[in-house]
Amino acid sequence: VRELVLDISLARQELGWIYIGARESGSWQTRYATWSGLHEPKPGARIKLTGNSYLRAAMPDDQGTLAEIRMPLPTRSELEVLETRTWGDTGFVWARVATPGAAP
């Protein structure tokens, strides 16, 4: 009898939102993760945190209140971007992230 074992580390799991930096006039003023390219990371892009960060349940609300912290993320954590959004007209860019899926 053979037993099927599923390696769940290969399955992508949505985590929440992280702040990745601020843009002004089309240029990054701050970046708290690295990724290829000069623009916001596209869905599916892999990013690596350049410092400790907090994973949050959501982006800030319209009044600027930060969502609850789901967990701290250490420097060099690798994540997969599901989408990016700019918060209001501030230039503050947030990314909805997941654990990286299996590499193609």
Image (cartoon, rainbow, N blue to C red):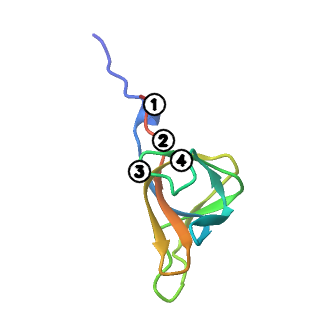
Where is residue 60? Give x, y as percent.
50, 78
Q: Residue at x 41, y 42 (%)?
A: 12
Of the image marks 3 and 4, the number of the one nearer the N terminus: 3
Q: Residue furthest bottom?
A: 63
How far is the residue under mark 2 from the one under mark 3? Answer: 12 Å
- Which of discs 3 and 1 lies nearer the camera? The answer is 3
- Quadrant location of the N terminus in the rendered image: top left
Q: Residue furthest left?
A: 1
Contact flag, marks 3 and 4 (Cβ < 8 Å): no
Q: Residue at x 53, y 73 (%)?
A: 68
Where is residue 40? Give x, y as percent.
51, 57
Count of residue discs: 4
Q: Mark 2 = which residue? A: 100
Contact flag, marks 4 and 2 (Cβ < 8 Å): yes
How far is the residue under mark 1 from the one under mark 4? Answer: 12 Å
Of the image marks 2 and 3, the number of the one nearer the N terminus: 3
Mark 4 neighbour class, 10 Å CA radius: few under 14, some 14 to 19, many 20 or more: many
* SS category of the residue bearing label 2: loop
Q: Horizontal placement of 30 versus 26: left or right?
A: right
Q: Mark 4 = which residue? A: 79
